Image: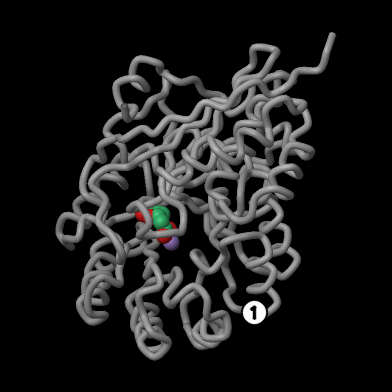
Amino acid sequence: MTAPVIERLETLIVDLPTIRPHKLAMHTMHGQTLVILRLHCSDGIEGLGEATTIGGLAYASESPESIKTNLDRYFAPLLVGQPAGNVNAAMQRIDRGIRGNTFARSAVETALLDAQAKRLGLPLAELLGGRLVDGLEVAWTLASGNTEKDIEEAERMLDLRRHRHFKLKIGAREPAGDIAHVAAIKRALGDRASVRVDVNQAWSEATALRACAQLADAGVELIEQPIVRHDVQALARVSARSPAAVMADESIECVQDGFALARAAAAPVFALKIAKTGGPLAVLRVAEIARAAGIGLYGGTMLEGGIGTLAAAHAFATLPALEWHTELFGPLLLTEDILVEPLLYRDFKLHLPQGPGLGLSLDDERLARFSRA
Ligand SMILES: O=C(O)C[C@H]1C=CC(=O)O1
Ligand SMILES: [Mn+2]
């Protein structure tokens, strides 16, 4: 039998409605756009990958349109005709021919791993060395922009036993208003839930130093990316003085950024994201750097749909410790996904499927309905 090769990459842009507006410091989302990659192999196996970002180019340097164009124009020619079963060899070709573009790279690495795991009849976590847990706790982001609505939403999630960690998106307005909003939510939820905030780079160092102390007094336990992504030294100073743990998110745009932050003791917690580092294997490299440096881990998201969410979940399930749990709730923000079976969220956790590969299949009718012409 001849070894299977990669025959074709098919890419689709899918626009999906969200259950409510999602308000971040840099952008308010009214829907989410997924770039879906179908990697067709000569043995008839199809690997699935996905890339998402937030607000076009508002969040990061890749947009859905650039991801699709770059997959079609630059990634595909490097991959077509290559052995489908050697993920490392395929990714080495990408690393030699393409700089950056970790969001697109993540879709490719995911699709190659999904195809190979299906070929071997293994769930992806098992191809990555084996799962240590079957489920991951998932935080929910309260980002309606309204304190009362956010409290109601949190109460509903607690009643449903879906989430007991809440992340609040702040930074779009004056710190005093944000802190009052966060404190009111924490007061209402008390010890029944943990409250974290994501500032998405909105503060200066001076503002962060003051606001982190006030947030800690209000009972916030984790403060994500309080200042601009590139000032590693300033992040280290804020982390050293903040009574609540500081987490680096946008500061990590590749595996090497993770190393630089660890070396500078810039943050005691890292947000892992497959999109930022370039796939499930790449994200585990950042996790190893963090572990060696004694840095706590959090399983982050770029609000992917089911494919990207499960790709991250399979990787995160292989980690010995995920002290701050995950925020793999992207599919729950969509009114409809494009999968045959929805992901299983129950008892505060996302439960990993047991089937081969990612463990999901696309609903072709819905995919056609929501795909951009
Ligand atoms: O972490 C981010 O910055 C992006 C994203 C993750 C959850 C959410 O609500 O927004
Ligand atoms: Mn963040």
- Quick one: label 1, few (<14), some, or many (20+) residues within 10 Å? some
Above or below 314: residue 174:
below
Q: Quadrant of the C terminus?
A: top left
Residue in front for this viewpoint, 343 or 76: 76
Q: Which residue is mark 1?
A: 265
Q: Is residue 216 left or right of residue 41?
A: left
Whole-percent x, y for residue 355 in the image? 60, 21
Q: Residue shown at 66%/27% (left/top)?
A: 123
Residue at image position (45%, 20%) is 362
Image quarter (top left, top right, bottom left or bottom right) of the N terminus: top right
Residue occupying the far top of the picture: 1
Residue 232 percent across, percent down from the top left: 57, 80
Percent x, y of residue 96 = 74, 49
Query: What SS does tag 1 mark?
Result: loop
Residue 69, given in percent of the width and then of the height, sits at 48, 40
Q: Amino acid at mark 1?
A: Ala
| Location of residue 272 with respect to 87 vertically, above or below | below
